[in-house]
Amino acid sequence: MKEEDKIFVTQPAMPPLDEFINSLTEIWDNKILTNNGPFHIKFEKALADYLGVNNISLFSNGTLALITALQALRITGEVITTPFSFVATTHSLWWNNIKPVFVDIEPDYFTLDPEKIEAAITPQTTAIMPVHVYGNPCKMARIQEIADTYGLKIIYDAAHAFGVKQNGSSVLKGENLSILSFHATKVFNTIEGGAIICPDEKSKKRIDYLKNFGFAGETTVIEPGINAKMNELQAAYGLLQLKSVDNYILQRKVVTELYRQYLRDVSGIAFFDDISGIDHNYAYFPITVDVKKYGRSRDDLYEKLKSHNIFGRRYFYPLISQFPTYRGLASSSQYNLPVATKIANQILCLPIYPHLPHADVERICNIIIKFKQS
Ligand code: T4K
């Protein structure tokens, strides 16, 4: 089989090349490549409008946005977080010398279980870092209630939640910080990229300083910031992407509905349905494989699909708590994380992207159905 016949878990949707070349020509003419140039200014404004938020600060990637968000709020000590995420979530704590305390996920949508947070709070706890995993919104009202009671900050890792709305309003909005990723593999990509959404202009100012080495003006450095600025090429590319993102999400929705239709009656295969009141972005199509009912394990299915050149991914296996840096922590014990441990062993994300041919979705599902019967 040829390389181009491989189907990966995702493939980036990209803006028309000729339009990007026009933007590049402008950049070549004005020779501003980075440091809050004209495309950066335009993109930041357009993105805030699109997302329906007031204050947003662009970043070179989501990981640096997470790291900077923690610094901006001066988070120290211990932070409660989920082990069922991409490693960058917990790595951002490590880079700030903060101890992660893992709390289990809830079984319905795999987000941090608010009912298990209180038991993990200690005098050192300063914040909670939940993740809207796969774009499923966390139980935000309950998490807020706990944070308010204990005087904790919340930083949402919203890397998967671009464009997700709850009752018509962006999940990124509110009194907390939320972090987006615009990595090539995301619903909305700027090749690499990210952002912090913050509640007011004052916090945006501080974040803008911190992503530019801490500079507040030509000669003042407020504290050791990092270089996490988005460059002009990323911003120009992002501006073009904004024109198409609604369409990308619509195409993802069609792919999602096809998967649901084909896999609905396959015993042992489960997936999410739409949640009432939520505008989803259809970022991923995760399934869980129940070995007893399906007759094959998740890893058997993963390998079977691979043998057909279909490269699903086990996001998020292993749990972050199983990586060497974190597995020695008391909260990493599988007895503390029974739901996350079970889901990590069952999860498989099937390929999804706007231009995934519908015939390929059918073929993938047929392999899944036949593999059960064989
Ligand atoms: N928080 C959460 C919850 C996150 O999921 C992430 C990132 C972050 C924070 C950090 O944000 P960033 O710092 O990345 O902005 C990928 C991504 O690298 C990562 O951004 C993402 N989460 C994670 C869930 O997935 P890998 O190692 O699985 O990516 P990779 O390179 O294997 O790509 C997957 C498939 O996509 C490839 O098999 C082929 C296809 N692909 C990939 C790239 C990069 C393309 O077709 N074109 C491409 O350019 O981590």
Image (cartoon, grey):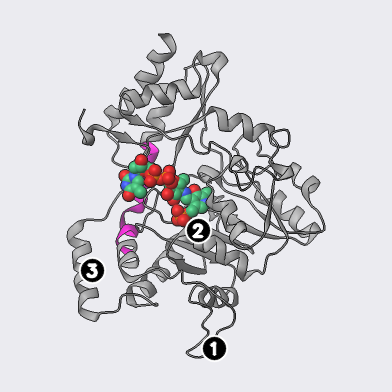
Tell me: 338 left or right of 226. right
When the figure is inspected, residue 282 is found, relative to residue 301, above or below; the finding is: below
Q: Position of residue 162 (x, y in %)?
A: 46, 53
Q: Quadrant of the rendered structure where residue 79 is?
A: bottom right
Could you give the CA–CA distance between mark 2 and mark 3, rounded to whole angstroms?
A: 27 Å
Q: Is residue 107 visible?
A: no
Where 187 sits versus 30, above or below?
above
User: Height in image: 354 above or below 258?
Assistant: below
Q: Is residue 286 left or right of residue 26?
A: right
The residue to which callout 1 is attached is 220
Residue 230 placement: quadrant: bottom left
User: Which of the numbered marks, if any, corresponds to residue 23?
Assistant: 3
Which residue does the image show at 54% across and 27% down from the upper left?
Answer: 346
Q: Which segment is the magenta one? A: 239-254
| CA distance for labels 3 and 1 | 33 Å
**Furthest-bottom residue in view?**
219
Task: Assign a secondary structure to mark 3.
Answer: helix
Amino acid type for the residue under numbered disc 1? Thr
